[in-house]
């Protein structure tokens, strides 16, 4: 099938054959089921909050760095490109991308680590599990149900963003076990945690990797955490850099031209490799994709190695750079302080969150406090910290 042909592949998810929603609703006369999911995600309160949640740099650093929202939109664009090229349902790929980071707390991975530590004896914290909580429980926009009542296909894509969570017998694949929110939900709504998600969800997951690699390089260069010449030895990135140098691109544009080329090469690699896998596996329906022993959408081995090399490069130079790590250590303490305060003084949360805490046991209270903090933006968390503590870091 030619790129951009618009023909739906046999293995694509079909909205007309969706497994439906947990709460039955009349169909829309103008939108497919997956398009409705996209629209519900875009209008969700949690989606708007992504504009003020850290990707790597907190908002004080400047207006030109990625936030969770801009990252999400970039992932969505790449996911749709992949879906179009592979004959998949673009709306389902978009829904999987739009919702994939809704569960992230303030301050990026620092906030997640802090909440995970605070909930050590209560199941820990996992942002994918929190995403499920957001779209099934915490969003309250509709009269007939909590959450967004998304289709089964969108929910499975969000939960299985990183692949199957259990084996066929239900045993968790990771040593830390199945996140509690996912285990609780699976008791009454089977998302088949042992299987791979749809090809559309797989496209969104690999789009997340592409966006992380390319745009973290872009933000790292802008922040001067490293320089162009340090990228020369990286596979894919180094080749793209040499091409821009050969064309005598002026320095202000060189970084942008580099990122554009890296994204294009990664997308082209995924399309070529995925077509090879699909031709070999020959799925005849979307269900065949779920039954596969490995993902049908992904990088070729050489590009997968390049992806690992890029992440290995970025880890010490960006994520663990003293300038970033110092700020994130302060952010970690802000989250821990808030958790400690709200568990001791739950009445200081808004009424809808404090309601009924008298009857909640210690574990239930801890989970509710974590849900409340996880929904905060960076700025709101700092403002709340300033209400209860004498000194609040500026995170600069």
Image: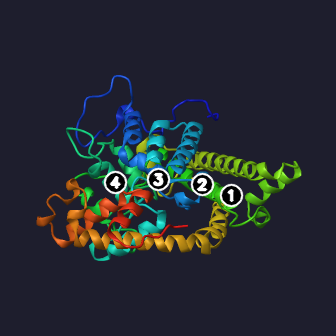
Seen at 40% across and 45% down, the residue is 287
From where the camera sits, is residue 303 visible? yes
Q: Can you say whether 140 is above or below 329 in the image?
A: above
Q: Which residue is mark 1?
A: 222
Front disc: 4 or 3: 3
Sequence order check, earlier mark of 1 and 4: 4
Whole-angstrom CA distance, mark 1 to mark 3, is 19 Å
Nearer-the-camera pick, 147 or 14: 147
Label 4 sits on a secondary structure element that is helix
**Image location of residue 396, percent across then percent down:** 55, 67
Nearer-the-camera pick, 177 or 344: 344
Sequence order check, earlier mark of 1 and 2: 2
Seen at 42% across and 40% down, the residue is 42
Whole-angstrom CA distance, mark 4 to mark 2, is 27 Å
The label number, if any, that marks residue 65 in the structure image: 2
Whole-angstrom CA distance, mark 4 to mark 3, is 20 Å
Q: Which residue is mark 3?
A: 52
From where the camera sits, is residue 297 visible? no
């Amino acid at each position: 099938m030619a790129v951009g042909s618009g023909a739906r592949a046999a293995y694509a998810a079909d909205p007309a054959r969706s497994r439906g929603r947990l709460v039955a609703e009349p169909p829309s006369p103008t939108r497919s089921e997956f398009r409705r999911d996209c629209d519900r995600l875009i209008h969700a309160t949690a989606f708007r909050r992504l504009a003020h949640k850290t990707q790597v740099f907190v908002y004080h650093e400047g207006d030109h760095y990625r936030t969770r929202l801009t990252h999400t939109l970039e992932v969505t664009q790449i996911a749709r490109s992949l879906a179009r090229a592979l004959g998949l349902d673009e709306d389902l790929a978009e829904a999987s991308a739009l919702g994939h980071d809704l569960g992230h707390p303030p301050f990026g991975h620092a906030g997640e680590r802090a909440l995970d530590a605070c909930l050590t004896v209560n199941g820990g914290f996992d942002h994918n599990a929190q995403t499920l909580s957001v779209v099934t429980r915490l969003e309250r926009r509709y009269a007939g149900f909590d959450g967004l009542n998304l289709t089964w296909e969108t929910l499975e894509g969000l939960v299985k963003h990183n692949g199957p969570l259990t084996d066929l017998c239900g045993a968790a694949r990771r040593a830390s076990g199945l996140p509690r929110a996912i285990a609780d939900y699976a008791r009454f709504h089977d998302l088949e945690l042992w299987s791979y998600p749809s090809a559309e969800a797989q496209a969104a997951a690999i789009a997340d990797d592409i966006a992380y690699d390319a745009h973290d390089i872009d933000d790292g260069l802008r922040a001067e955490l490293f320089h162009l010449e340090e990228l020369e030895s990286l596979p894919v990135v180094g080749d793209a850099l040499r091409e821009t140098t050969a064309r005598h691109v002026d320095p202000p544009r060189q970084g942008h031209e580099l990122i554009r080329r890296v994204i294009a090469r990664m997308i082209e690699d995924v399309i070529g490799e995925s077509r090879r896998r699909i031709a070999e596996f020959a799925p005849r329906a979307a269900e065949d994709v779920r039954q596969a022993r490995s993902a049908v959408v992904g990088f070729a081995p050489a590009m997968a190695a390049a992806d690992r090399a890029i992440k290995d490069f970025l880890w010490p130079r960006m994520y663990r750079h003293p300038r970033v790590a110092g700020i994130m250590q302060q952010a970690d303490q802000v989250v821990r302080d808030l958790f400690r305060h709200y568990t001791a003084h739950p009445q200081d949360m808004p009424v809808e969150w404090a309601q009924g805490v008298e009857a909640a046991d210690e574990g239930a209270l801890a989970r509710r406090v974590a849900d409340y903090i996880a929904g905060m933006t960076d700025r709101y968390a700092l403002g709340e910290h300033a209400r209860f503590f004498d000194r609040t870091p500026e995170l600069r």
